[in-house]
Image (cartoon, grey):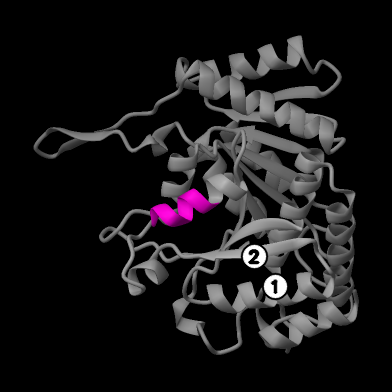
Amino acid sequence: MHDVVLISGDGIGPEVTEATKAVLAAAEAPVRWVERKAGVAALADGQDVMPEATLDAIRHHRFALKGPCTTPVGKGFSSVNVQLRKKLNLYAAVRPVRSLPGVPTRFDDVDLIIVRENTEGLYSGVENEVTPGVVMSMKVATQVGCHRIAHWAFRFATHRRRKKITVLHKANIMKMTDGLFIKEAEEVHHREYPNIELEMLIIDAGCMKLVQDPTRFDILLMENLYGDVVSDLCAGMVGGLGVVPGANIGDREAIFEAVHGSAPDIAGKGLANPLALLMSSTMMLHHIADELGDAQCAKVADRVSQAYDQALAEGQSTRDLGGSLDTSGFTQAVIDRL
């Protein structure tokens, strides 16, 4: 059994978390949950937004599964996700995007993975007021940060038997920051992974090519802001944020999460789609299998993936995907097909 920290989140978080727990239990996943809180749920419990007990548990157990947490817009506390990434140095954000059976979209054969540098760029949060009415935000890029995300992406591509990495950049304008990013990618490719194809694309042209034919891409590697935007764009190609998983991974710890919002307006109504968190849990199991050499985790992940694919193919889906099932109904549909 592997201890995994479980952060249910708030809004629809507890509902999709319980659904995911039920499916993994039915699939006999070798995990034992260590429940902790963060965000609004932690505040309601009299704790800090990001309790040290939660961080310590993740550091100790290494792996975590997290439901959505509310982030106030323009006021209140800072994002729980951002705090977790910074405090645990989770520098690689990973978002697999693939077409799903029974989820019709404009594209049929999307199968790509976005790898996003998670700690630098404009999201470093270095902002100041130059003079009244003039503010500045600083884009930060370090050789260490650029090199490690490039190395991580090529190693990940090797483990997942992917053949091509496309770097999206704006080095024609931001010659130093994005220039450093593509330089380090080229260096890693040349020195360690010449067997994997490397492609460089200016990001605006790359986005155009993405919506023309996403099947020409395999792994997309980019800095923080670009990755944030492009990952949601790609999610829209396969049905939205409700059908894509996500992960934030460092050298030791890794957190797997549903990337959609907490949707407090539908919380407690049984309308939430648990698919994104369920898909994230299969990512987590594959990661544990890779890190700890536990083949059973990978087998369970494959069984769960096949079960929800089959349910979707047979029209068993929640209302956001055009189906009629509520949260528990879809959960049972997946369990029935394990």
Q: Amino acid at mark 1?
A: Lys
Q: Where in the figure is residue 155, as x and y percent of width and height?
A: 76, 28
Label 1 sits on residue: 21
Q: Amino acid at mark 2?
A: Trp
Q: Which sits in the foreground, 211 or 159?
A: 159
Mark 2 Cα within 10 Å, few/some/many (few <14, many 20+)? some
Task: Please report the bounds of the magenta region as a residue range.
Answer: 51-57
Rendered-image quadrant of the C terminus = bottom right
- Res 315 visible: no
Q: Quadrant of residue 296?
A: bottom right
Q: Secondary structure at mark 1?
A: helix
Residue at 84% x, 63% y: name it.
Answer: 305
Residue at 74% x, 16% y: name it.
Answer: 189
Rendered-image quadrant of the N terminus = bottom right
Q: As drawn, is 142 to the left or to the right of 187?
A: left
Q: Where in the figure is residue 40, as x and y percent of width and height?
A: 38, 69
